[in-house]
Amino acid sequence: MAKKLQEPEFVYVGGKLRPWREAVLHIGCEAVTRGLNVFEGIKGYWQIDGSFGVLLLRRHYDRLRRSAKLLHIPCQWTYEEFEAAIFELLGALAGPDRDMWIRTTLYVIEGHWGEGTVADLVLTAFHQDKSLPEAINLGISTWQRSSDTSLPARIKTSTNYQVARLAKIEGRAQGCEDMILLNQWGRVAEATGACVLMVRDNVVYTPPASEGALESITLAAVEALAESLGINFVRRPIDRTELLVADEIALCGTLSELTPVKSIAGQALPEKSPLLTSLQVRFFDAVRGVHPHPFIDMSVLPHSRHTTTR
Ligand code: PMP
């Protein structure tokens, strides 16, 4: 059965919380006609001490601003205003025992071909199960990641996900939960909504952003965790055939967290993935405050410890 999007009670739009059904855009605005927006997907986790923390919020704000700059979308929100808006929405929606995924989007609501551009900050938040990600089957798509001279992967905009959508449809027909997109040189760029980690001979490799991957915040966090664990972590181009003979593969991103891969292009991977499993354990210990790490900065939702129970 097709998955249905949750319909949370509130959306933050036009500077305040409104009921889900009232969060509408006009069909004439560039957000609709050209899919013009930039966005971030951000994760909030219940902490071991009973508070609710939003992961690496400052980095997400900074990347949102970079995406906006690259698409000439003005962003008038300060970090403090951005954080306050997120906290307002989470205060209304966060409930016990469920984590949250927050989408923060700058939709272009006024302007034409780059003149008179005005954006609105729209926030939606969805409940997430606290379970660990299950291992997936990963395919390799015939669709290609667009290049830095067409639609740069560095810009986190919805239009970049048209190709991802095609790859997902292609993958579904092959029994694959996610797909790798290769870049214009035929090397590994990333998955449809996550970066790729590959282990060969006890070294974790991932392609640099210049291979056509988003500048992933989770990846930077995992790199810092790997360093603390004494695991070699190298950013370098990855050939398609290297993936086929890899010892371990995982996807890495805000929503994927660290998702193990059990098969690649129809071939099973070795059952044990010791390096990526130890990184996954360390990651969840850090984001839940069980074993904090200096890189893993959590913005704590005010009063969350007292107003809600875990
Ligand atoms: N690549 C793509 C295409 C993505 O959509 C995401 C998820 N935002 C990532 C990589 C991982 O980035 P991050 O760790 O910042 O979520």
Image (cartoon, grey):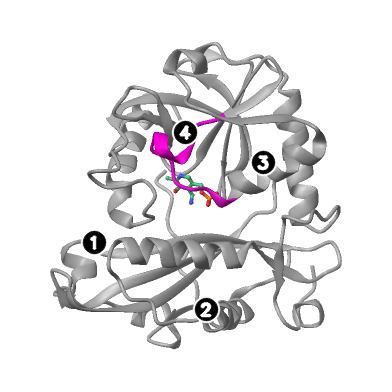
Q: Mark 3, residues whose alpha carbon is within 10 Å: few (<14), some, or many (≥20)?
A: many
Three-letter code, disc 2: Phe
Q: How far, Cα to Cα, is label 2 from label 1?
A: 22 Å
Q: Which of marks 2 and 1 is nearer the N terminus?
A: 1
Q: Which of marks 3 and 2 is in front?
A: 3
The secondary element bearing badge 4 is classed as loop
Q: How far, Cα to Cα, is label 4 from label 3?
A: 25 Å
Q: Quadrant of residue 43?
A: bottom right
Q: Nearer the viewer, residue 85 or 203?
A: 203
The secondary element bearing badge 3 is classed as helix
> Which residue is label 1 attached to?
35
Q: Which of marks 4 and 3 is nearer the N terminus?
A: 4
Magenta includes 116?
no
Q: Which of marks 1 and 3 is nearer the N terminus?
A: 1
Query: Residues in magenta?
Result: 206-217
Magenta includes 211?
yes
Residue drawn at (29%, 28%) of the image: 184
Q: Mark 4, residues whose alpha carbon is within 10 Å: few (<14), some, or many (≥20)?
A: some
> Which residue is label 4 attached to?
177
Q: How far, Cα to Cα, is label 1 from label 3?
A: 33 Å
> Which residue is label 3 attached to?
223
